Image: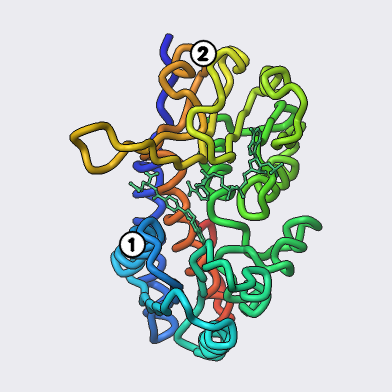
Amino acid sequence: MAAQVIDGKAFAAKLRERVGRQAAQFEQAAGRKAGLAVVLVGEDPASQVYVRSKHKATVAANMESFEHRLPADAGEAELLALVERLNADPAVDGILVQLPLPGHLDEQAVIAAISPDKDVDGFHVTNAGRLAVGQSGFVPCTPLGCMMLLTDRLGDLSGLEAVVIGRSNIVGKPMAQLLLDANATVTIAHSRTKDLPVVVRRADIVVAAVGRAEMVKAEWLKPQATVIDVGINRLPAEPGTDKGRLVGDVDYAGAQGVAAAITPVPGGVGPMTIAVLLRNTLVAAYRNEALDLPEGAL
Ligand SMILES: NC(=O)C1=CN([C@@H]2O[C@H](COP(=O)(O)OP(=O)(O)OC[C@H]3O[C@@H](n4cnc5c(N)ncnc54)[C@H](OP(=O)(O)O)[C@@H]3O)[C@@H](O)[C@H]2O)C=CC1
Ligand SMILES: Nc1nc(=O)c2c([nH]1)NC[C@@H]1CN(c3ccc(C(=O)N[C@@H](CCC(=O)O)C(=O)O)cc3)C=[N+]21
């Protein structure tokens, strides 16, 4: 039987709608809209696409969107000064500095400059630490979105074997942390893992966050596994076309014959990331105004 397709796009649309309704209520209560500032340094085309879709989604969810573009050769002092201004701006609840930054800029220093209470990406060490010790803070959008899809599908994850492939600070590590908090038995695999197919084979839940097109093969999967494919890889354009198609880190077609359920690329995790960003921004807005988020809101 073919695997079920986990429709992240539809799930994300519902989440954005809920956030939009709550954002309208926030505006009533606070006398202003919740605000998200996005900072883009340079002209990376993929980043420009993301930033544009974040802007549209923010406005559609009844929030204010502030876009700041700096040239690719902007100095670190200039970027840090902008972050400081956004930290101090009461109209800004959330700050996102689009990554990757051009090579001459120190990403860690820039992230460290963002106020943890406005760090809706959840990348600041304060928020990473809060996640690690179980305090409430901001959780990175992509892993939180993956968890929403998993718990929606599987309910209680207690005792399930989860394998996360990838250990980045923005996806793999926080993903593993969330799965652990949900009482899964968690393994983190990475480029030094000796026998990845064998490790993946024991997983009831596979989260692939590697950045290698179709690396995870159908034969690696345990039958009836649930597969969350975070990877976004653009294949080279076919002759006669201008853009290559997007694929994930998992051999999607093959996995469909083995897995119980799988997220597609596009239309899986990607749309969830943006929806959770809006959710985090609204949570930040309620906190910044010291208002209580309505019970069971999001
Ligand atoms: N859908 C979405 O919203 C988002 C999608 N992404 C996508 O997710 C993917 C991962 O992103 P990100 O975490 O930032 O990537 P990074 O490049 O920071 O991390 C990749 C991880 O994969 C591991 N890895 C690399 N090669 C192998 C291999 N052959 N076998 C096993 N593990 C390997 C690396 O191991 P090691 O640590 O040993 O080097 C590393 O931990 C990318 O495709 C990215 O575009 C990212 C963010 C959001
Ligand atoms: N500070 C920061 N925070 C991020 O959250 C962040 C970042 N920097 N840098 C880049 C990555 C990547 N990322 C994605 C968001 C949405 C889609 C998305 O919506 N993807 C669509 C397809 C989009 C397309 O067609 O290109 C989909 O999968 O259906 C993908 C990837 C956020 N990131």
Q: Is residue 285 above or below residue 240?
A: below
Kind of residue at disc 2:
Val
The picture places residue 249, in percent across and down from the top left corner, at: 51, 33
Using the image, tell me which numbered label, if any, was put on residue 258.
Answer: 2
| Position of 276 relative to 177 (above/below) | below
Residue at 33% in and 58% down = 49
Residue 141 sits above or below residue 86 on the image: above
Left of 261 or right of it: where is 160?
Answer: right
Going from N to C along the chain, the mark reached first, 1 or 2, is: 1
Label disc, if present, on residue 47 of the rendered structure: none
Front residue of this view, candidates 95 and 22? 95
Question: Horizontal and vertical percent for residue 196?
Answer: 70, 24
Q: Name the secondary structure under disc 2.
A: loop
Tags 1 and 2 touching, CB below 8 Å? no
> Quick one: label 2, few (<14), some, or many (20+) residues within 10 Å?
many
Q: Position of residue 88 (x, y in %)?
A: 56, 90
The location of residue 5, given as percent across then percent down, is 40, 27
**Tag 1: amino acid:** Ala
Q: Quadrant of residue 38?
A: bottom left
Residue occupying the point 31% across, 69% down = 59
The residue positioned 44% from the left and 63% from the top of the image is 278
- Position of the N terminus, as image quadrant, is top left
Quickly name the residue at label 1.
57
Q: Is residue 12 visible?
A: yes
Which structural element holds mark 1?
A: helix
| Crowd rating for badge 1 (residues with CA inside 10 Å; few <14, some 14–19, many 20+) | many
Q: Residue at x 44, y 74 (%)?
A: 72
Which one is in front, 67 or 137?
A: 67
